[in-house]
Amino acid sequence: MKVFVAGATGAIGRRLVPKLTEAGHEVTGMTRSQAKAGALRKAGARPVVADALDEAAGHDAMREAAPDAVIQQLTALPDRLEYSDKALAPTNRLRSEGTRILLAAARAAGARRFVAQSNAFLYEPTGDLVKREDEPLAEDSPGRVTDALGELERIVTRAHGIEGLVLRYGYFYGPGTHFAADGGVAEDFRKRRFPVIGKGRAVYSFVHIEDAAEATVAALERGVPGIYNVVDDEPAPLREWAPAYARALGAGKPLRAPKLLVRLVAGKPAAELATAMRGASNEKAKRELGWTPHHPSWRQGFRESLA
């Protein structure tokens, strides 16, 4: 299959492109940086340097690649995990405007399938602690993330003339992620500025970056149109995983902070995310994609990835 990957040099793109080529696919990888084109060639892909928000360039690149399928992995996140409007605005724009441009170019080029990145940690923070794909996203979120993701998911799943799949990934960990030993979250833990908020009840769903890439290949090859949570088998509350992550990292035990302080400093949406976030179920992805994570739990995953 001829596959066009947008965001091919991001955290997941760097793992995804080699897996696609190893599976026998002919890959074109798009990046904004000429300096990263060599890495794509080394991974077996044909590089194309273009800005995802440049409509003319996007259509030209897609027309030349003539892909059967397109995978959208576009983000512009800062090195340190932040939830401010300013930090998240570039990624929000890529997820809304960028997806519209990419999808239109894919359809015009004759692509049959479109796979897009979304998040599994922004479900409505009420009801069950672990959510399925048919449950609603939060109406409010830090940095207006759910507005952009909601638009992306509507654009992709309601697209005409092309099969649209959305992958709601959990928090990435492993090489090249915020949770890597050299990542921004690790730095925050070492400096003890990643506290357990309130009673630490917020439920997180993680996925190792390699498992996320493998699930993406599975979705490309055999997924039916729709939405899939791509997470590991063990959603966990903050009070449980944060101390384990700190131990694996060799950092001090996380401090605690009251919810009121977070609300005053970061606003209500951030406080809700920090105290009431829901986890996600991977049952659908395992059942329908035939995918099983090699790192079924963050427990051994943290130890192995930070060793």
Image (tube, rainbow, N blue to C red):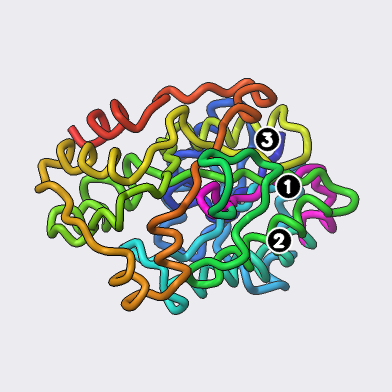
Q: Secondary structure at mark 2?
A: helix
Quarter of the figure with the N terminus: top right
- What type is the residue that disc 2 sits on? Leu
Q: Mark 1 near mark 3, Cβ–Cβ under 8 Å?
A: no
Q: Position of residue 104 (x, y in %)?
A: 79, 62
Quarter of the figure with the C terminus: top left
Q: CA distance from mark 1 to mark 3?
A: 8 Å
Q: CA distance from mark 2 to mark 1?
A: 9 Å
Q: Quadrant of residue 259?
A: bottom left
- Of residue 169 and residue 137, the one placed in the foreground of this image is 137
Q: Which mark is residue 102?
A: 2
- What type is the residue that disc 3 sits on? Leu
| Residue 51 visible from this viewpoint | no
Give the labeled residue for mark 1: 114
* Residue at (27% x, 58% y) in the render: 184
Q: Quadrant of residue 172?
A: top left
Q: Residues within 10 Å of mark 1 (few under 14, many from 20)?
A: many
Q: Mark 2 near mark 1, Cβ–Cβ under 8 Å?
A: yes
* Residue at (10% x, 41% y) in the render: 250
Q: Residues within 10 Å of mark 2 (few under 14, many from 20)?
A: many
Give the labeled residue for mark 3: 220
Q: What span is colored magenta in the figure?
A: 105-123
Q: Position of residue 52 (x, y in %)?
A: 61, 67
